[in-house]
Amino acid sequence: MEHLRTHTGERPYECEKCNKQFSKLGNLNTHVRTHTGEKPYRCEQCSKQFSVLVSLKLHIRTHTGEKPYRCEECSGQFSQLISLKAHIRTHTGEKPYKCEQCSKQFSVRGSLQKHMRSHTGEKPYRCEKCSRQFSERRSLQKHMKTHTGEKPYNCEECSRQFSELGQLKSHMKTHTGERPYPCKECSKQFSHLWNLKTHMRIHTGEKPYSCGECSKQFRKQDHLKKHMRTHTGEKPYKCGQCSRQFSELGPLKNHMRTHTGEKPYRCEQCSKQFSQLDNLKKHIRTHTGEKAYRCEQCSKQFSEHSSLKMHLKTHTGEKPYRCETCSKQFSQLGTLKNHIRTHTGEKPYKCEQCSRQFSQQGALKTHIRTHTGEKPYRCEQCNRQFSESGTLKTHMKTHTGEKPYGCEQCSKRFSALGNLKKHMRTHTGEKPYRCEQCSKQFSESGSLKKHMRTHTGEKPYRCEECSKQFSLLSSLKTHMRTHTGEKPYPCKVCGWRFRHKGNLNVHMRTHEAKDGNPQ
């Protein structure tokens, strides 16, 4: 009789709680337990209870390790038939379950049901400890362990403990080096299937995670979560030393090393140490000369991806960051932040040697080299060393003769953009640097610094021979000739030599007078 109902569709047994109907009395009795919470079947190994006998039988296999269902394609084994059927679809590519909202397809019905909650926003699983809600039961189970601190899975290699079996299995691959999932596009291999799936989006361009605020799309859900904090301003990671807050855990870890001084990443070439792995990778390129990032517009190559991104804005002209004080626009947020300090006068970076303060961290690093004498940038042509990479680049043009920056007013050319900008002020008459003491203006910041010493009396350049001090480096260099006897300025007429160029000029007039051409 019960079998005939599979043909007739008759369902004579009705649940009094929810009116759901069943063709068999046993199915009704099992269903009623979802209302009563009754779980009469207990596991003798771990005392876990189940409402259905078949669920207990399946559970017991987690203790015995029994996997009676084998895949004929790859010999993978499974404890449940339904798991085998779902697995076979990874070989066939079959995805019979389609979302009616966005047409996305799934190989497993449960995956579709979970996906539907991304449209409905339904979060049926609530934590009884903190009332936080989740769209998946497994997410709730993971979350509960944050309250209990339970980590029942132990790695036999390094004794590290995990709250989930899957996490332990993933961790074990760090010991075995196993990477069973290769990318068919670029042959890169991965230890986890989900890492491969995420990687494939680099090739397909798929960005399934969209920001509801600005419609920006992302390949990874984590990237979307991080991005959302730029809208909410949320910074959940706080430094215990100085209370500084961060939107991501990684930057907090890096920041903590500024307190501890830890530099765990060492360069094998020169033994220089770094607090961040990315900085080590960038540094290694100074040895290898690798420039992996190429501009498609002009074929210029860069050693860092961020440098390529910045460079691309020179083609697009994009300057999305605007100063609210003077409306000046910038292509980079960091440049805007540095610029704002020209208005506020803020100089947060202090030298521990001489207490001098700087508005930019890079300027402080460069300044520190004046104390240490470090010159890490070497010219391959003449072995001259420099404390700044920009100075080396400018110097290299003295060997190549390259002068790519031309003045539109007088056609004079320069090897450095900064020199062109300074030169342009000879045409415009611009003097943007003003002395606060006497209001005198200068076309270059260096000239203002030199001038300020006339007010402060500062003489930072000391002669090591006689301890005499000078306000200008050039004055010290000239003075040193009184000790060395050096006379670098020769007269082309009589060969007489002079320590000062001014003295040579005066001497030249004696020859001009003899020739009958007094000036």
Image (spheres, rainbow, N blue to C red):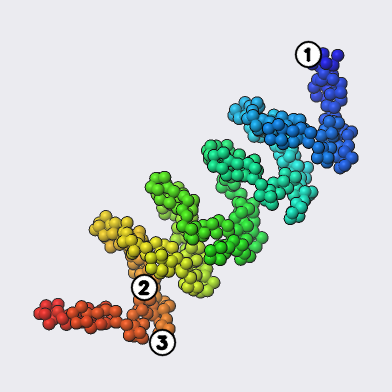
Q: Disc 3 designates what residue?
A: 466
Q: Which mark is residue 7?
A: 1
Q: Which mark is residue 451?
A: 2
- Sequence order check: which comes first, mark 3 or mark 2? 2
Which one is closest to the eye, mark 1 or mark 2?
1
Circles 1 and 3: CB atoms closer than 8 Å: no
Estimate the x, y position of residue 267 in percent, counting from the top left.
Answer: 55, 62
As shown in the figure, which amino acid type bears the numbered disc 2?
Answer: His
As shown in the figure, which amino acid type bears the numbered disc 1?
Answer: His
| Disc 1 to disc 3, C-alpha distance | 113 Å
Residue at 60% of width from left, 44% of height from top? 189
Question: How packed is label 3: few (under 14 Cα within 10 Å), some, or many (20 or more)?
Answer: few
- Sequence order check: which comes first, mark 1 or mark 3? 1
Regarding mark 3 in the picture, which secondary structure is present there? Answer: loop
Q: Is residue 98 visible?
A: yes
| Disc 3 to disc 2, C-alpha distance | 25 Å
The reply, left or right, for residue 86 in relation to residue 30 is left
